[in-house]
Amino acid sequence: MPAFRDFNFKLLVIEKLMYEDKTLTPAFSIAECLKAKGIDDPQLYAYDNDLAYTVLDEARAHFETLEISEELLATVDTLLIDGGLQVYCECSPVWDGEDDLFDVNSLDDLDLLPNLRRIVGAENCGLGVPFKKEILAARGIVSD
């Protein structure tokens, strides 16, 4: 199985496959995960344990070890960058999008997505490092 180097880039791919395309199953739910531990409210749990603006350990462990086949990765032609992604809600139930918690730090994982042609929202995130138009264009990827 291919290995991702950037956890936050992997989350963008998981968003596409698990929550948008619904081809990476079963869909992870932090509420269900915590409920199995006797915790009824993920938001209250995060606040009460000073975890409000972090990735919960349960979500990190699940997503870090989640294997995604080359066949599924080959189906990814578009990625979306947006503070309201479902995968972010599953990782950090009270995250407000006002910090760099989910910033992608490397585009090394682009090699895992041979058919990626478009990244939506890259311009709204400032096209800073690493989403420079030149880097994406050199790979045949449109950013908007």
Image (cartoon, rainbow, N blue to C red):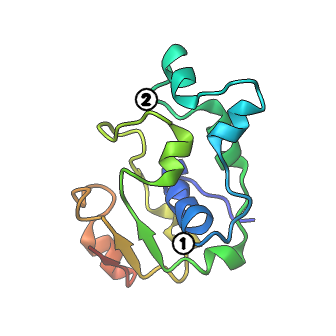
Q: Nearer the viewer, residue 15 or 30?
A: 30
Residue 57: quadrant of the picture: top right
- Quadrant for the C terminus, please: bottom left
Type of amino acid at the residue the image marks with label 2: Tyr
Q: Which mark is residue 53?
A: 2
Location of residue 40 with respect to 140 vertically, above or below: above
**Mark 2 vs mark 1, CA separation in Å:** 30 Å
Measured from the top left, where is residue 105 in percent x and y? 41, 50
Measured from the top left, where is residue 44 in percent x and y? 53, 22
Residue at image position (72%, 48%) is 65
Q: Nearer the viewer, residue 141 or 46?
A: 46
Residue 60: quadrant of the picture: top right
Location of residue 62 with respect to 81 vertically, above or below: above
Q: Nearer the viewer, residue 17 or 136?
A: 17
Q: Residues within 10 Å of mark 2 (few under 14, many from 20)?
A: some
Location of residue 81 with respect to 61 vertically, above or below: below
Residue at image position (52%, 14%) is 48
| Drawn side of residue 28 relative to residue 96, left or right | right
Location of residue 136 with respect to 44 vertically, above or below: below
| Drawn side of residue 107 relative to residue 126, left or right | right
Type of amino acid at the residue the image marks with label 1: Asp
- Residue on which the image places disc 1: 111
Residue at image position (49%, 57%) is 9
Asked if the residues shown at circle 2 and circle 1 are in contact, with their CB atoms under 8 angstroms apart, the answer is no
Label 2 element class: loop
- Quadrant for the N terminus, please: bottom right
Q: Earlier in the sequence, mark 2 or mark 1?
A: 2
